[in-house]
Every structure is written in structure tokens, then in C-alpha cells.
Amino acid sequence: MTAIGRIKAERPDIEIVTMTSFIEEEKVTSALEAGASGYVLKDAEAEEVAAAVRAAYANAGRPLCRGAQARGHGRRLTGLFDR
């Protein structure tokens, strides 16, 4: 999460999509609060990853959760999606 904060501090124009195997809510929350534009699980299909990257740039500054959202985290993280 430190890297996300550093990158966004130097280059706020860059959208960051985090790809990880962690689905725990605190991991998703930490990444999005650190400035990640999206969160994708490593087991996501290639098209889902590509869609997350496209969505990150289309929704610049508005977090997106793929994969984890489908597993129920999206409903609990809705406050992060409203910034």
C-alpha cells in the first residue's frame, strides 16, 4: 500500500489497478484508500482485468472493485466508491 501512496503523490494522474490474491475486506479497503483506482483478484479472467484497466481510466479517480465485488465485498465497500 505504501507504493500506491508514493506513486499517487508523485503522479496523481496515474490510475493504479491492484492485482492480488487477497480478498479480505481490509486489504481491499487499504488499497482503495491508498489511492488505487481498482482492485482485481489474480484469478480474474483476462477480459475482466482488461475491463478493470479500461474502467479505471474511464472513471478516473472513482474506485472500482472487480472480482472481490462479485464475491460480496462491493456492497460493504460502497462508501469508497462514492468519493
Image (cartoon, rainbow, N blue to C red):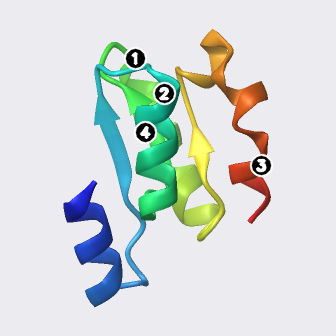
CB atoms at circles 4 and 2 under 8 Å apart?
Answer: yes
Q: Does the CB distance between marks 3 and 1 fall below 8 Å?
A: no
What is the three-letter code of the residue carrying label 3? Answer: Gly
Q: Mark on residue 45?
A: 1
Task: Say whether residue 73 is left or right of residue 25.
Answer: right
Please report contact status of discs 2 and 1: CB closer than 8 Å, yes or no.
yes
Question: For residue 50, which numbered disc appears in the image?
Answer: 4
Name the residue beneath numbered marker 2. 48
Q: Is residue 78 left or right of residue 11?
A: right
Kindly report the distance in space between the C-alpha atoms of the residues bearing marks 4 and 2: 5 Å
SS under mark 2: helix
For disc 1, the neighbor class at 10 Å (few under 14, some 14 to 19, many from 20) is few
Residue found farthest to the bottom:
10
Quadrant containing the N terminus is: bottom left
Q: Position of residue 79 (x, y in %)?
A: 77, 49
Q: Position of residue 21 (x, y in %)?
A: 29, 19
- SS under mark 1: loop
Q: Which of pointers 3 and 2 lies earlier in the amino acid sequence?
A: 2
Q: Amino acid at mark 2?
A: Glu
Q: Nearer the viewer, residue 8 or 67?
A: 8
